[in-house]
Image (cartoon, grey):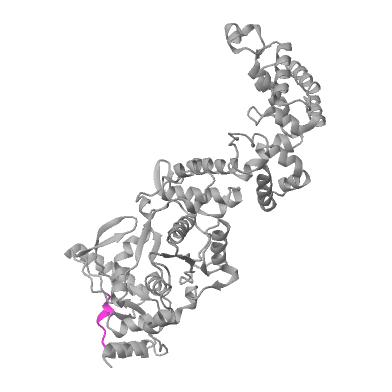
Amino acid sequence: MNDNQKIAELLFPNITTTPEYYYKKYPKRYLKDGAEVTRIAPSPTGFYHIGGLYQAVIDKFVAAKSGGVFYMRLEDTDQKREIADAGNIAYEALRYYGVTTQEGYMGSLGESGEYGPYIQSHRAEIYQSFAKYLVSIGRAYPCFCTKAEDKAEILERREKELEEGTLIMHDKCRELTLSEIEDNLKAGKPFAIRLKSMGDPDKTFTFRDEIKGEREIRENGKDIVILKSDGIPPYCLAHLVDDTLMGTTTVVRGEEWYQSLASHIELFDAFGLPRLKYAHTPVISKLDNGNKRKISKRKDVEADSRSFRIMGYPKEAVVEYLVTLANSDFEDWRAANPDAKLLDFPFSVSKIGSNNPIFDWAKLNDISKNIIARYSAEEIYNKSLAWAKEYNMDFAKKLEDNKEYAISVFNIDREIAKPRKDIAKWEDLPSYYDYMFNEYATLNVDLAQLDMNVLDIRNIVEDYVNTFDFGADKDQWFARVKELAVKHNFCIDNKLYKVDPTKYNGNLAKFCTIIRVALTGKTNTPDLYSICMSLGKRELKNRAQAI
């Protein structure tokens, strides 16, 4: 037994397994050629970020398109930042948005799959086995420095680098002898395990990122920590062990990890493991006073994936919007294939741009409006009621107490060639349809905007309501509206009206606007005929008398 092997035994006396044991325990997945295995691996440190959902959508496409596997792993190695139930929140967010995994961590439901445990804190012995092996072959060593010493050492190195123009990346514990390590252990000093880097930062190598393409990268020269003093690894070793044993083929992760790529690759090489494919996704950003910045978990509502659920955006709208951020040709495809399934879209990682996309509320609203416009009135009722039961109980009660009426209201301007696209999210419904569901007295109808004597307005509306024929079709109704307009001195011929508008109280459009505003309080509503048919004779009379 050489010194490196003796050191490994001193550091890990209770670890009797080797990486080879785990390679056999978790055999290669039997999938068809070209099948990709992807994973989403959130840290349970708070709400589920929209950036995580964005990456999960990409993972789902990559796996599904290739006939592969998409699974979930919980990266809970940072115990200090962990927030109770955050893992379950992440899983439920994925499930809610339909970005479902085929195996792995399942929140409060436990785990499913043959490659677990899928919770990293349950895999400590596996990580320590890999760390022990790396020590035994001389590619890792124990570091007994305290955090304070580490900080002072880093500052000292920086000063040296400035003075000498060199890169000094190695830890001072790197050259400890076997006897010195024994002395430190006898003294009860805690230790971390560092990679013994063989890289030269002055040299580069070529690497192909699935998004960025082929790039030149500087070799790693840092003795990075691969196992903390609590026996739990940071991301670098956990990533290598878990993605290797779980059969991951493509790692989709944020741009912020690109700077660590060289150290991760050196770690794979140190173990003699094949390198994985990486897709470093651009970071979703926003404009703040004209400046582009990363979406903030503390400041921006769009950072929390739950926000869109609370506001009532259909889950399909949120996911489709994220696809547009990844592949800009999605909108054209959707326009040409309005009824196609999302996974029918020819998604490609190679089409993801390298620039950080800007979160655009207007585009999300447009996508959502298009989706809601394709819903039937019954679908709108059911989906909005489910939302209202969670976030607006008053509106939920109105919907439940008036189901048939509500469906008839939602059906206005819907079963036509070009349905209206006014609703972007369910929280819009109560205010948008307040004139249909609320008491007329609560609508705060502003008749002053009509620039007409209130008595004349009342006469027009009473005349309209008293002669409204619920048996008439829309053409017959409109013919009657024109007769009333003429009766009240409104011109129904625009060309004639433009010759001398002073001869009339207004044109036909103004006449209809008077009726619309007086009965609903709004200048812009769906079809007036359908509104009146839904309100019914009694409600029309009540509203006319209330003017």
Front residue (pair 154, 55): 55
Residue 190 in sight in this render: no
Rendered view: 34 above or below 295: below
Rendered view: 407 above or below 142: above
Front residue (pair 313, 89): 313
Q: Residue at x 58, y 42 (%)?
A: 424
Residue 537 screen position, x and y as percent: 81, 29
The N terminus lies in which quarter of the figure? bottom left
Q: Residue at x 33, y 87 (%)?
A: 8
Residue 76 screen position, x and y as percent: 48, 70
For the image, the number of numbered tags is: 0
- Residue 175 colored in magenta in the image: yes
- Which picture quadrant has residue 535? top right
- Residue 368 colored in magenta in the image: no
Rendered view: 137 above or below 523: below
Q: Residue at x 42, y 61 (%)?
A: 66
Residue 200 screen position, x and y as percent: 21, 69
**Which range is magenta?**
171-177
In-image side of 275 versus 127 (left or right): left
| The furthest residue to the bottom | 1
Q: Residue at x 50, y 73 (%)?
A: 119
| The furthest residue to the right | 538
Residue 45 screen position, x and y as percent: 50, 64
In-image side of 475 versus 236 (left or right): right
